[in-house]
């Protein structure tokens, strides 16, 4: 046993109140309800004490400094985001190894053009915690709206920049989350310039979405409801923005605005929380005018507009195609509107029969698609790996750009008037190669390859399949350094997510690369609830079927043990966000199966998740605790509510940000406190002697959120502490 894990810990006092909720006739104790007041002196004192305990614990590890140095060296890679092309210019974020935050660059499309930085946020805060959360250039490429996030918050503040001069326009837009502004090319007056104040702004501007300002002091806690669509005219204040659309009777609805290429229609994709089934609303903007009307509002399938040709729309949809297809219809020709453009929900068989199928459903899952120059670029998932297809307007395949055998397409971008489409391709050991696809010729070439301080070819990834508890075949990736044996002698880290229709493709994460570089085997299971195999796969892990996700993950652990790839005392598990729920549920159901757990920013209180920030939207996957039929299912696996005093839990490190406004940090606070209270003081049956129990610790990152825009230094520190804890816990188990 090493010095670190031989410590017998004395945990900070965490008051246990007598608070009890009556839910559907059941008494549900909540002794740590006070931890929901995250800014209270009592909670802040507890956080300080827990962080101090963790620091003292890790500081005794002889390998912590070595791990930090190595992770820092691995972090010195340079990548760019997918380029956005407007007005003969490409805009992208560049991740510079010397900087905490990415900088925004612009580059002309002419050959041999050189990129220049137009926005650098690194000096905007002492800790480098101001990040560029999004950007949107106008059609000319001369103006750019950009959003800033501070300390990892989902809240964004948007500004407007003159690309040529670098001057800022005067207006600032607040209380924005989950938006991508859409510029309008229409003008009804003179164009304002930077510093012109609010006097000359007419016509030119963009559509965007926002929420009402939360109550003072509730910015990181209050539920976000009733998103609105507005139009901001350049040179005016946010208070003057025109309200375009809202549906207060549906407070969970969110909107994504788009314009047809001729700006004859405004299109609003409607999201109900995180449900994958969407709606579509349209509004005529030409001289015919009219109010917004519902085109598809039955929410029977996913509908995403990937391109337009005048009033003709091209949609990626799961309607009658669980794994996705491409269809089109014409708003002018196929809808029976009255003279002023009014209509009702057209999601009826008579309307759907007018659709033209362009690309039919295939065996592989259609993950994303774009339209450019009368061509479609389609990204498919083949057993969770990536495949690219270029198709013409009849749906005929004209090219299949070659990719790595096992990789992930993490982004696609196009612009209607250009034949270029850009794709970002990653792997477990590849931070990202941007390829440029000429849709007219069907040819592809490398636009930018990540510059790395490590050799990606020194790592190998294999895809395997195993059977879950009910016999379902589950794909799993096993990745490691080529010189590390896959025979159970190396430490193994099993990672998963299993939710929200998100496919767990072989994407790059610095933490996972560092684990492999340190000599560990990384395993990623593609669980039900994800998007690997379409709607049915997602539904099989949602709501009343949520236990399937946990069974799939525990079956992955058992497969690793039975195949000889891992031993119990060298097996750790981890997950983030919904993945934090995954590992929290599995460790409380089968604490004997794992030696160590890393639960990051997890959803852990399944009876109150819907009461904070954007949590109400997650009922798509979890169901609502207010539903008497789903309440017992949620209660049965809720990690906070299934910790049993006296059980011996594996070594666990819980991590969160002190103001995470995606997954409220009280989830992690309650879970850590309850585990510390329940963990027996001795591993001997009589409680009188024996080795110290496995440590239960929490790391609360100050001035941090869910992970968005985490500075490089903070990221390196978080990864270092996680792997220091896990490696020492596994050494404890094997020693």
Image (cartoon, helix red, strand yellow):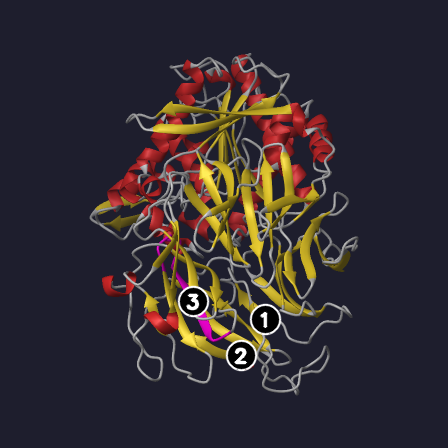
Q: Are marks 1 and 2 in contact (CB under 8 Å)?
A: yes
Mark-to-mark CA distance, 2 and 3: 29 Å
Circle number at residue 241: 2
Looking at the image, which is closer to me, 674 or 100? 100
10 Å crowding of disc 2: few (<14), some (14-19), many (20+): some
Q: Which residues are magenta?
A: 263-278
Spot occupied by residue 283 in the image (x, y as percentages of width and height): 41, 75
Looking at the image, which is closer to me, 573 or 45? 573
Which badge, 2 or 3, is on the more N-terminal residue? 2
As helix, strand or loop, the secondary structure at mark 3 comes to: strand
As for residue 186 lying within the magenta part, the answer is: no
Q: Are marks 2 and 3 in contact (CB under 8 Å)?
A: no
Badge 1 is on which residue? 173
Q: Are marks 1 and 3 in contact (CB under 8 Å)?
A: no
Spot occupied by residue 148 in the image (x, y as percentages of width and height): 63, 60
Spot occupied by residue 525 in the image (x, y as percentages of width and height): 45, 30
The quarter of the picture where the C terminus appears is top right
As helix, strand or loop, the secondary structure at mark 2 comes to: loop
Residue positioned 64% across, 50% down in the render: 81
């Amino acid at each position: 046993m090493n010095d670190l894990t031989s410590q017998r810990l004395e945990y900070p006092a965490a008051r246990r109140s007598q608070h009890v909720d009556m839910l559907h006739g059941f008494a549900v104790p909540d002794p740590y309800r006070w931890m929901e007041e995250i800014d209270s002196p009592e909670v802040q004192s507890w956080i300080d004490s827990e962080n101090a305990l963790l620091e003292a614990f890790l500081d005794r590890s002889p390998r912590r400094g070595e791990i930090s140095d190595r992770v820092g060296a691995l972090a010195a890679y340079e990548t760019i985001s997918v380029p956005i092309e407007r007005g003969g210019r490409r805009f992208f974020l560049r991740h510079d190894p010397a900087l905490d935050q990415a900088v925004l660059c612009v580059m002309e499309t002419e050959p041999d053009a050189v990129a220049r930085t137009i926005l650098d946020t690194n000096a905007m805060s002492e800790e480098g915690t101001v990040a560029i959360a999004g950007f949107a250039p106008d059609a000319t490429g001369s103006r750019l709206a950009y959003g800033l996030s501070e300390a990892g918050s989902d809240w964004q503040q948007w500004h407007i920049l003159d690309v040529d001069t670098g001057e800022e326009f005067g207006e600032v837009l607040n209380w924005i989350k989950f938006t991508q502004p859409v510029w309008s090319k229409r003008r009804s007056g003179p164009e304002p310039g930077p510093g012109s104040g609010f006097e000359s702004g007419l016509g030119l501007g963009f559509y965007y979405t926002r929420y009402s300002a939360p109550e003072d002091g509730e910015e990181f806690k209050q539920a976000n409801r009733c998103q609105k669509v507005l139009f901001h005219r350049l040179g005016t204040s946010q208070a003057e923005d025109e309200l375009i659309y809202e549906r207060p009777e549906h407070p969970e609805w969110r909107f994504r605005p788009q314009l047809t290429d001729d700006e004859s229609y405004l299109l609003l994709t409607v999201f109900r929380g995180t449900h994958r089934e969407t709606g579509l609303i349209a509004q005529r903007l030409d001289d015919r005018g009219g109010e917004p009307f519902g085109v598809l509002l039955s929410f029977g399938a996913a509908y995403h507009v990937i391109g337009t040709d005048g009033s003709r729309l091209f949609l990626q949809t799961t309607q009658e195609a669980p794994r996705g297809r491409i269809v089109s219809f014409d708003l002018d020709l196929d809808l029976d509107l009255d003279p002023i453009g009014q209509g009702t929900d057209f999601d009826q068989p008579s309307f759907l029969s007018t659709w033209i199928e362009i690309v039919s459903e295939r065996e592989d899952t259609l993950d994303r698609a774009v339209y450019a120059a009368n061509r479609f670029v389609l990204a498919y998932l083949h057993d969770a790996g990536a495949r690219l297809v270029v198709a013409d307007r009849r749906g005929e395949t004209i090219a299949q750009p070659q990719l790595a055998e096992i990789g992930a397409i993490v982004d696609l971008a196009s612009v209607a008037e250009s034949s270029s489409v850009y794709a970002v391709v990653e792997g477990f050991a590849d931070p990202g190669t941007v390829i440029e696809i000429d849709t007219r010729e069907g040819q592809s070439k490398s636009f930018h390859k990540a510059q790395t301080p490590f050799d990606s070819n020194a790592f190998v990834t294999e895809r395997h399949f195993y059977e879950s508890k009910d016999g379902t075949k589950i794909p799993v990736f096993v990745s490691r350094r080529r010189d590390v044996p896959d025979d159970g002698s190396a430490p193994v880290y099993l990672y998963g997510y299993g939710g929200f229709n998100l496919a767990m493709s072989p994407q790059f994460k610095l933490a996972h690369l560092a684990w492999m570089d340190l000599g560990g085997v990384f395993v990623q299971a593609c669980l039900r609830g994800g998007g690997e195999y379409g709607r049915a796969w997602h539904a099989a892990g949602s709501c009343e079927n949520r236990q399937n996700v946990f069974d799939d993950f525990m079956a992955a652990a058992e497969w690793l043990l039975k195949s000889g790839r891992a031993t119990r005392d060298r097996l750790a598990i981890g997950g983030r966000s919904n993945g934090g729920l995954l590992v929290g549920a599995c460790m409380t159901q089968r604490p004997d199966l794992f030696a160590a757990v890393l639960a990051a920013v997890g959803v852990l209180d399944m009876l109150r998740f819907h009461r904070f920030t954007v949590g109400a939207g997650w009922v798509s996957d979890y169901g609502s605790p207010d539903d008497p039929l789903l309440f017992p299912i949620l209660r049965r696996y809720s990690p906070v509510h299934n910790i049993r005093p006296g059980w011996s839990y594996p070594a666990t490190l819980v991590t969160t940000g002190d103001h995470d406004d995606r997954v409220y940090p009280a989830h992690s606070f309650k879970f850590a406190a309850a585990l510390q209270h329940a963990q027996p003081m001795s591993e001997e049956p009589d409680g009188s002697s024996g080795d110290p129990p496995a440590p239960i610790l929490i790391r609360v990152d100050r001035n941090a959120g869910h992970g968005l825009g985490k500075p490089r230094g903070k990221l390196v520190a978080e990864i270092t502490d996680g792997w220091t804890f896990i490696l020492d816990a596994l050494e404890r188990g094997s020693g």
